[in-house]
Every structure is written in structure tokens, then in C-alpha cells.
Image (tube, rainbow, N blue to C red):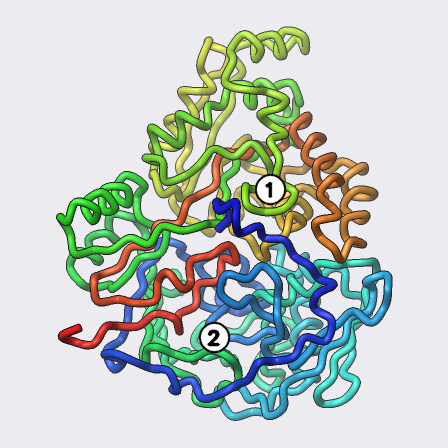
Amino acid sequence: MKTSAERLAVLGCAGIVAVAVAGCGSVTDAVKGDGDKAITLGTTSVTNALDPAVAYDAGSWLLLRNTFQSLLSYPAASSAPTPDAAQSCEFTSGDATRYHCTLRTGLKFSNGHALTAADVVYSIQRTLKINDPNGPAGLLSSIKTVEAVNDTEVLFHLAQPDATLPAKLAGPAGAIVDQEVFPLDKALANDKLVGSGPYKIDSIEATPKNGPAKVMLSPNDKYIGDARLRNKKFVVRYFDKPTDLKAALDSGEVDLADNSLEPNTAAQVLSDQQGGKTDLHVVEGDSNDTRYLVFNTKDATAGNVAVRQAAAQLIDRKALARDVFARTVQPLYSMVPAGVTGHNTAFFDRYGDQDTAKAKAILTAAKVPTPVKLSLTWSRSRAEGAESEALKKQLEAGGLFQVTIQHEPDWDAFKKGWTEGKYQMYTIGWFADYPDPDNYVAPLIVDGGAYHHGWDDPRISQKLVPDTLKQTDRAAATAVYGQVQSIVAENAPLIPLFQNKAFFTSRSDITGVESTVDTTGFFRFWEIGRAAKGK
């Protein structure tokens, strides 16, 4: 979602002032082609909880973006949020501390209950109250109070300036829930969810651990919004392994796959398509997915900055992209990926290419005995274990490190492990909540970040990040983000590895995929259709 130089994801929050809604209509207005047959999307972005107050991963947000409304959303190929459940939104104070929205009229949840400003207030307060440690509450932490002025007007009072609030509200963290259905202090079961988005959940087939394995969706006839559905049924299937997803695609069990296929497989499908050897189609586009090597800085070994700097000196991103990911990713030397304002090459500027002599000098100067023994834990990777094996080989170059690989296949156990500081270093992906540089800095760096690396620098958390949040012109904050990334590169609490390219694979009769692959990270189910027979 960020590999295109022409499509910079610059979030101009000042441009949101009094944005009018273009129109609305029935979700069935635009269904075309063979719309009665369900379209099935396969993904390996497995998840567990789907309640917006606790859901904060790619697998849940994939679904929530299509079944819930937020005050704002992202149109296709746009980097600026526009009204969704809202009719208009604007900052009403010059210091970006007061934000006002007016709702569309006639909004309803799929159960027929009216959606009012009180539901918006309840949704925000509920997420903050539940404050799930692995949930999205942190994205709303700038909100001091939120009030319903009347049934259609909502006013946010912020504890400090936050020019990114509109962008945060445009994702599932700002999803509006029915206060008559969702309990205030705990998550709702997956099979009880009710939203106001273009789709409603008809049924869920659960895994033995009660996470979703298959979710059946149909148009929400109560929906009021801009989406025009090109299908009448949509199914999401979650797969544990890329190989299982590819087999389902080949057999016709799924119609399309998101960016979940094993890299060499995706590259081969693209090559076969170009050579006329397959009826599968690949849409290659931008991606906002990034990948990092994270250190537990509270650990006695990984907590030594010299150890982390030496590791940064040994990482060979080009080899990783070429040899492990078949060029379906591109090297990343910045917390902020290419295509997003604020991107730079801070890690390359400091460390350059892999250099064992420089790494040895760092450890020698800090009097760190070698080989440094570290464990590397991973849970899920599109390249399976090949990614960790490659990192192990790179880190062990010159005999400076001795790396033990640990695989934790249980995703929930993996999240619990990093939260509790059980790992020394681990690989993890990050998908953007919103296309703004702040989303690659504040949630990953400030006060230990979402991955609990334990590192914080007051220069960043108390001065630089707050300064950027006063800038409603997001491009004006670029220089400050440069300072932030230089500090991160020096201390290396986590090391950026690569950013994905998007390879969405579909069967030949599936249409519309190219309309929903962009830098927003928002996969719009309603854009996907099936060509009529004979066409």
C-alpha cells in the first residue's frame, strides 16, 4: 500500500473541514454479473476476537471494515478520510483539541435499531473502558471526553492536540456499536455482533479455540452509505498455512486470496499468468504492511544497545527480499515505509549494508563477549520458517551471534508471550491503522509500543510526537519524523526489515480486485464481483 511514489499517503486533516457526503443508496443498487453465487476470500491473517473494542489485527479488521461503520472512512485510492456514518466532520478549534461531527440521518444497525450520537459516544467510551491490552484503545487515548450534543451531533474534547484523530476514527477503532447489544465492560461473542456497515454477518464457523474459521456475509439492507455492492453474498475463510490457501484456490474452494500466499508461490503465479500458463490472475499493487525484528529491551542481553546495534549492522534486507521473499517485498530502512510522507532511510544512513567488521567493532567497544546468545521467536510468516532461518544465518555471520530459533504456532500464545516479555527477539508484521507516519511511530515506539519492546525515549514520547500531532498539514511534520527515526535507528529497539508488495490472486471470473488494492489497507468486499457467464 505504499510502494507507489506517485501515491503519497499524506493525511491532510485540515482538509476534512465540513466535508459533505456525496450521496447514499441501497446496497443492492450496483450488484452485477453472477451476483447470486457467493464470492469467497481466503486469508492466512487468522484472528480470534471480532468485537471492535478488543480486535486489533489484520484478520479481524479485514472483516470489521466491511460490517461496521465509523464516523469516517477511506474511499478507494484516497489517503484522506471522508465522512461515512457522518455527514460532515471538522476541527472546531485552532489547536486541534476539539472535533465535531454531524451524523447522516436515518442510520440504522442491521437489527433495525436506530444509530444515534449516543451510540457513537457509547462505542468510544466502551473501548476506552475495556482497554484490552491487545486492543485498539491506545488509538483513542487522546480523547478526554466525548459527548452527544443531540441525536445527530458528536463533540470530541481532546486532552492534547491530535491532528490524526480523524484518521484513527476512520478505522475499526472508531467502529460504532449498538449500545443495546454490546456490554459496556466486556467483549461480545463473535456470533452476536451487530453493525451498520454494508454487510451483516449471517453465520460464523468457529475453530476449536472459537476463533473464526469461516464467516458468511450478506448485504445489510439497513445500510445507508456510499458503498455499491457488486455481490450478494461474501464469505471469508481463514487458513493456518499459505499452502492450504493455495490448494483451496486451485480447487475452486476460494475465489481469491489476499496477500497471504507464500512469496515464491505468488511470484510463480504471476509468472505463469504472464506466460499464459494459468487461469489465475494476479493484481500487483501497493501495500502498507511492514515487517520488523523486535527486541525485548528489558532482557539482560537484548537490553544492551550495543547488541541491538550490532544486529542492525548484520541484517541484509536485500538478500531477505531476493532469496526468501522472491522480490514480493522491498527492503525497508525506515520505521515509515516508502510511499508514506515521513519515509527516509535512517537505518541505511547509520548502518549501510551488512558489515561484520563494523558489527564486531560495536560489540568490542561495548565489551560484549561473543558469540552473543539470543533466541529468535516467530509465529507466522508468509515465508514460513525460511525467514527466521535467513535472519539466523545473517546474524551469525562472523561468529558474532549464536541464534536459537523458537516457533510458537499458536497466535494467541505468541501475543501473550511478547506482552509478558518472554522473548528476547521476535519477528512481527505491522499493518497500518491509517496511512499516516504517526501510525508507524506512536503505536510502535512510544512507551514500549504495541509489541511491548520496553523502550521509550522522552525526546520522542514527550516532545517530538506531541509536536507532530499539532500539524494538521501532515507534510509539514516530515522533518520532525526524520528526527524520530534517527533516534530509533541509533537505539534499535526494533529493526525494520521490509515492506510487502501486494499480490492479490483470483480466479479468472472475479472482477474488481484492482479497485480495492491501495495504500489505505482497506479491502472493500463490495468492489468484488463475478463476471456473468459468457463474458
Q: Is residue 16 above or below residue 432?
A: below
Q: Position of residue 65 (x, y in %)?
A: 50, 68
At x 54%, y 7%, the residue is: 357
At x 45%, y 50%, the residue is: 286
Q: Judge by depth and name the residue closer to the eye, 168 or 238.
A: 168
Q: Position of residue 142 (x, y in %)?
A: 76, 60
Between the C-alphas of marks 2 and 1, the distance is 29 Å
At x 18%, y 63%, the residue is: 252
Q: Which residue is mark 1?
A: 336
On-image quarter of the C terminus: bottom left
Q: Position of residue 8 (x, y in %)?
A: 57, 50
Q: Position of residue 425 (x, y in %)?
A: 53, 32
What's under tag 2, amino acid-wise?
Thr
Q: Secondary structure at mark 1?
A: loop
Q: State the image quarter where residue 217 is shown.
A: bottom left
Label 2 vs 1, first from the N-terminus: 2
Q: State the image quarter where residue 421 is shown.
A: top right
What's under tag 1, amino acid-wise?
Val
Q: State the image quarter where residue 162 is shown.
A: bottom right
Q: Please identify the residue farthest to the right as the structure is shown.
A: 94
Q: Is residue 79 above or below residue 125?
A: above
Q: Judge by depth and name the residue closer to the eye, 385 or 411.
A: 385
In-image side of 135 versus 251 (left or right): right
Q: Which residue is mark 2?
A: 67
In-image side of 51 versus 99 (left or right): left
Q: Secondary structure at mark 2?
A: helix
